[in-house]
Image (cartoon, rainbow, N blue to C red):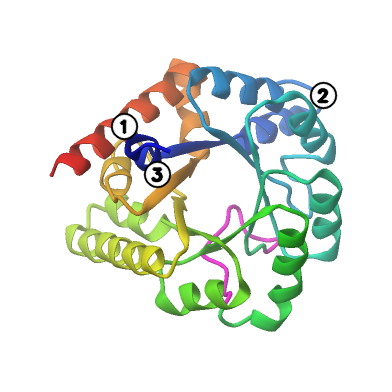
């Protein structure tokens, strides 16, 4: 693989909220699989979908279609439960990202406490890995959680970037600096430990550049913002603009 291919930052498009809109009225429209096809054509490198226990957006049939009809690799976000493990082992997506899940939350409100759940998570990570599925842990950028990922044998971690995004939304420059430095420091630490580093949550056109420029980060997963922007300018346009911003930041970061 060439150096440029190694450094290219991948974009995973999360299509959950296409399904959220569909489910608000019932029926089949808008179709998450069609959104996935459009994302592929617009330059996405993968599709992310979170099959929640309450099926509030993505449903089991959506996973079947994404696996059967979409050529891009599927990153299945799921809680560490026996039901979700069985679904993952049946479909064998390219990747599974284990996330925390609480029924009452609107969206994922923080990273997985892998350090506090080592014994519980170990068989899930092992069984998914044995099935040839790339396992990722959705964690806060924290050294304890990185150590836990290594202990569990998970090859990938995805940093929850919500605190960074919220600091920017609040225009709290001091906190924004702290949160960004946390991401940068732990991305370096994780890469030195041999982990592949991904990031996502709350990333927008305005804040993606700094994160995309971090050379240790290999993939960004973005959904809610892109689906929201699609209302105003179309899904293809929103994905292409995000792709261009990521590529620009990566290129400028490589030259600096």
Answer whether labels 3 and 2 touch (C-beta < 8 Å).
no
Closer to viewer: mark 3 or mark 2:
3
Q: Nearer the viewer, residue 16 or 44?
A: 44
Q: Secondary structure at mark 1?
A: helix
Where residue 20 sits in the image (x, y, percent)?
67, 36
Badge 3 or badge 2: first in the primary sequence: 2
Badge 2: how crowded within 10 Å, few (<14), some, or many (20+)? few
In the picture, measured across the screen, residue 153 lies left or right of residue 256, that is right
Q: Residues within 10 Å of mark 3 (few under 14, many from 20)?
A: many
Q: Which residue occupies 36% across, 24% down?
A: 241
Q: Name the residue tied to disc 1.
A: 247
The chief SS type of the magenta part is: loop
> Looking at this view, is 202 or 195 the one in front?
195
* Location of mark 2 (residue): 27
Q: Which residues are magenta?
A: 102-114
In the rendered image, residue 14, in percent from the top left (x then y), is placed at 57, 38
Figure quadrant of residue 251: top left
* Viewer-nearest residue: 58 or 170: 58
Decide which of tag 1 and tag 3 comes sooner along the chain: 3
């Amino acid at each position: 693989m060439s150096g440029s291919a190694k450094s290219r930052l991948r974009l995973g498009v999360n299509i959950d909220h296409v399904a959220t809109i569909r489910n608000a009225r019932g029926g089949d429209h808008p179709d998450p699989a069609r959104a996935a096809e459009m994302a592929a054509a617009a330059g996405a490198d993968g599709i992310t979908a979170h099959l929640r226990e309450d099926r509030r957006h993505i449903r089991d049939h959506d996973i079947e279609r994404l696996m059967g009809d979409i050529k891009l690799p599927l990153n299945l976000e799921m809680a560490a439960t026996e039901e979700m493990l069985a679904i993952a082992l049946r479909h064998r997506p390219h990747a599974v990202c284990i996330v925390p899940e609480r029924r009452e939350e609107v969206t994922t409100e923080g990273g997985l406490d892998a350090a506090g759940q080592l014994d519980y998570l170990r068989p899930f990570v092992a069984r998914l890995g044995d099935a040839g599925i790339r396992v990722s842990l959705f964690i806060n950028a924290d050294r304890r959680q990185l150590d836990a990922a290594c202990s569990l044998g998970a090859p990938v971690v995805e940093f929850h970037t919500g605190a960074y995004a919220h600091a920017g939304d609040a225009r709290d420059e001091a906190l924004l600096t702290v949160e960004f430095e946390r991401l940068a420091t732990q991305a370096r630490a994780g890469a030195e430990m041999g982990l592949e580093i991904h990031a996502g949550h709350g990333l927008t056109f305005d804040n993606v550049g700094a994160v995309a420029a971090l050379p240790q980060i290999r993939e960004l997963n973005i959904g809610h913002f892109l689906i929201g922007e699609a209302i105003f300018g179309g899904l293809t346009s929103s994905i292409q603009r995000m792709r261009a911003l990521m590529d620009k930041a990566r290129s400028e970061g490589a030259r600096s």
